Image (cartoon, rainbow, N blue to C red):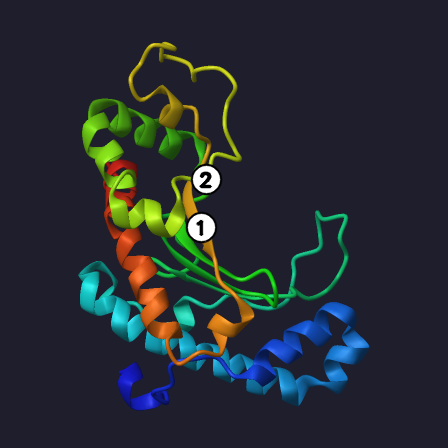
Amino acid sequence: MCTNIYNKLFMLQASTLLFLKNLAANNNKTWFDANRKIYENAKADYLNFVANVLIELKKIDTSLELLEPKQCVFRINRDVRFSKNKDPYKNNMGAHFTMGGKKQPSAGYYFHCQPNESFIGGGIWMPIADELKRIRQEIDYNCAEFNGIVSTTKFKKIYGGLDASAKLSRPPKGYEENNEAIEFLKLKSFTAIAPITNEDLTSKGLIKKVTTHFEALMPLIHFLNRAAVA
């Protein structure tokens, strides 16, 4: 179990942030190869952090019982095949905590580590058409429940509300403008994010902060996954 493999640390190391900062300024294979040992140390530090987050997260969300740390962490290499940005590496380290691991399209919790641009969040981003249809239907049928989830004091204090940056200007097909859930139904993604500072990342309170943020998301995650498989 991860409790026997990973060190019980509560924050990320400053050296990990420094590596990511330097990588952003030198995003090329030559520099990366020359600094591969530093990268390996940063990678191990991040995986250790993810393992400790997962230990705490499993205490509150039993649906993640079988999830292992390595299933959560994304590779640092970028897929540049269809991107105008040909930088070979990501300038961040990310982890997605969801049933079955990061490759599953289900809703989950997300931690993004990037100097000056880090955040904690979760939900489901740009679900495929069939999943989006099921989620909208579930919200339509259970508007009061969904509104209650994203209107709790804890959720609003941490996240403010759902991210509405990806949203239709008109009602989706099959729904009227006067539907009480219309503003939710127009959403293309169902996510919430909260920024965290560089100081947070190296603070002993980081694990507790992440766990508290994820706990506020849990009802939303469970609602979305219930809808997606309905």
Q: Quadrant of the N terminus?
A: bottom left
Q: Secondary structure at mark 1?
A: strand
Above or below, 193 against 128 in this view is below
For residue 68, say whether it is visible.
no
Question: Image check: 102 left or right of 117?
Answer: left
| Residues at marks 1 and 2 touching, judged by CB atoms closer than 8 Å | yes
Q: Residue at x 31, y 66 (%)?
A: 211
From what the image shows, is residue 192 above or below residue 39?
above
Of residue 13 and residue 32, the one placed in the foreground of this image is 13
Q: Kindly identify the residue that appears in the image at 72 percent across and 64 percent down.
A: 88
Q: How far across and how far down the image is residue 158, in percent?
A: 36, 52
State which quadrant residue 86 falls in: bottom right
| Disc number placed over residue 163 in the picture, else none | 2
Query: Tag 2's secondary structure?
Result: loop
- Residue 189 x/y as whole percent: 44, 37
Rendered position, 70 above or below 192 = below
Rendered view: 134 above or below 65: above
At 57% from the left edge and 83% from the top edge, which residue is drawn?
14
Q: Amino acid at mark 2?
A: Asp
Where's the C terminus, which quadrant?
top left
Kindly identify the amino acid type of the residue bearing the numbered disc 1: Ile
The answer to whether residue 25 shows anywhere in this view is: yes
Q: Position of residue 131 (x, y in %)?
A: 36, 34
Could you tell me how far apart the alpha carbons at marks 1 and 2 are, in whole angstroms? 7 Å
Furthest residue toward right: 30
Residue at image location 38% in from the left, 85% down from the top: 9
In-image side of 168 versus 160 (left or right) = right
| Residue indicated by mark 1 | 193
